[in-house]
Image (spheres, grey):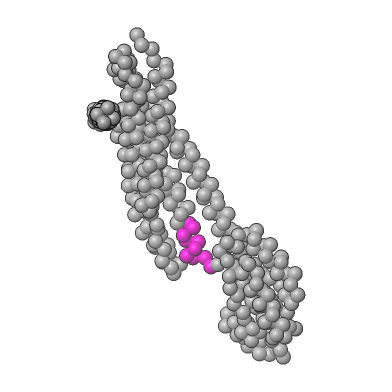
Amino acid sequence: MSANIKPNKSNEKGSNIFFCHWRRQIGYAWRNTFNNFTQHIFASLLTVFVIAISITLPTISYLLWKNANHASDQWYPTPNLTVYINKELTSTQTTELISKLKSYPEVEKIEYLSRDQTKEEFKTWSGFGNALDLLDENPLPAVAIIIPKEEAKQTTILHAFQSKLLEIKGVDDVQLDDSWFTRLTALTDMVKSIVWVISIFMIGSVSLVIGNSIRLNIFARRQVIVVMQLIGATEGFILRPFLYNGMLIGFISAIFALILSEVFIFQIDSIILRVSAIFGTKFTIKGLSWDESILIVLFSIILGWLSAMISTKKYLKTMRIA
C-alpha cells in the first residue's frame, strides 16, 4: 500500500511544482509586456492608433454593407411575377390554373385579381376610369400576382420560373418585377467585394505594423535576449513576452477601432434620419452586435499573436550568441 501511495504523492508534488513554475513564467511575461508598453507609451499608442484606424476601415465598410442589406429589406418590396390570364378561360378553368400555379415549389402565395377587380384597380390608379366606361366590354384580363419564396428570390431562379410559367396553357404573359432587385443585388455584391478587398489589405497592413513594432522591440532588447540565451533560456521563454505584446497591441487596437466605429455610427445616424424623412420612412443605422464586436477583438488578438510570432522567430534565427 505504501509503495502505491508514494508515487502518487510525488506525481502530485511534481505537477504542483510545474504549475507554479508555469504561473511564474506567465506572470513574468505579462509584467515584462506591461512594463515595456508603459516605458514606450508614446510609440506604443502611436502604433495602437495606426492599427485601430486600419481595423476601423473594413469595419465601417462592413457596417455600410450590413445596413444596405437592411435598407433593401425595409424599403424595397418583394420581387413578384404578374401572370396575365387568358380572357377566354371560364371560372372553373381559372380556378384550376390558380391551383396549378400554387403547386410550384417556388411559390409562397398568390394574390388573384379577377377581371372586374383589375378594372377597378385601373380606374383607381390610372386616372382613365371614364374611358373604360365608354367600352362595350372589359378589355383587361384577370391577374395572378405570384410572391416567390425566400430561397427563390434570385435573379436566375426567377427568370427560369418566368419561362416555365409562359409555357402553361391559359397564360398570356408573365411580367417579372425585378429590375430594382437586379440593380440592388449588383450594388450589394459590389459593396461586399469592396469590403473583402479592403479587409485583405488592412489585415496585411496590420500584420506589418505589429511585426515592425515587435521587431523594433526585439532590436532594442537584443542584448537581454543574448544574455537569456547564454544562461540557457528556452525559445518559448524568450518568445512569450513578445507574443503577449502583440496580443496586447491587437486587443487595445480592437477596442479603439470599436469606439471609432460607434462614433461613425453616431455621426451618420442623424444624417440618415433626415434623408429617410424626406422619403417618408424611418430608418436607423445598425451598429455592431456583441457577437460581431467580440469576433473583431478575438481576430485582432490572434492576428497580433501571429504577427509577433513570425517576426520574433525570424529575428531569433538570425541572432548569433557572441
Kindly give the residue lying farthest to the top in the view shown. 322
Residue 320's x, y, as percent? 38, 12
Q: Residue at x 41, y 32 (%)?
A: 306
**Residue placed at 59% from the left, 67% from the top?**
148
Q: Position of residue 210 (x, y in %)?
A: 38, 31
Instruction: Tell me where residue 305 sits by quadrant.
Output: top left
Residue 320 left/right relative to 16 = right
Magenta span: 68-77
Point out the residue furthest to the front here. 1
Which quadrant would the N terminus be assigned to in this image?
A: top left
Residue 96 vertical position relative to residue 314 in the rendered view, above or below: below
The count of marks equals: 0
- The answer to whether any part of residue 37 appears in the image is no
- Residue placed at 66% from the left, 87% from the top? 132
- Front in this rendered view, residue 202 or 298: 298
Residue 245 in magenta stretch? no
**295 vs 174: above or below:** above
Horizontal and vertical percent for residue 216? 35, 23
Q: Is residue 229 above or below residue 36?
A: above
Q: Residue at x 42, y 48 (%)?
A: 60
Q: Quadrant of the C terminus?
A: top left
* Magenta run includes residue 73: yes
Residue 57 in view here: yes
Q: Horizontal placement of 126 versus 63: left or right? A: right
- Residue 23 sits above or below residue 160 on the image: above
Q: Position of residue 104 (x, y in %)?
A: 65, 69
Majority secondary structure of magenta residues: helix
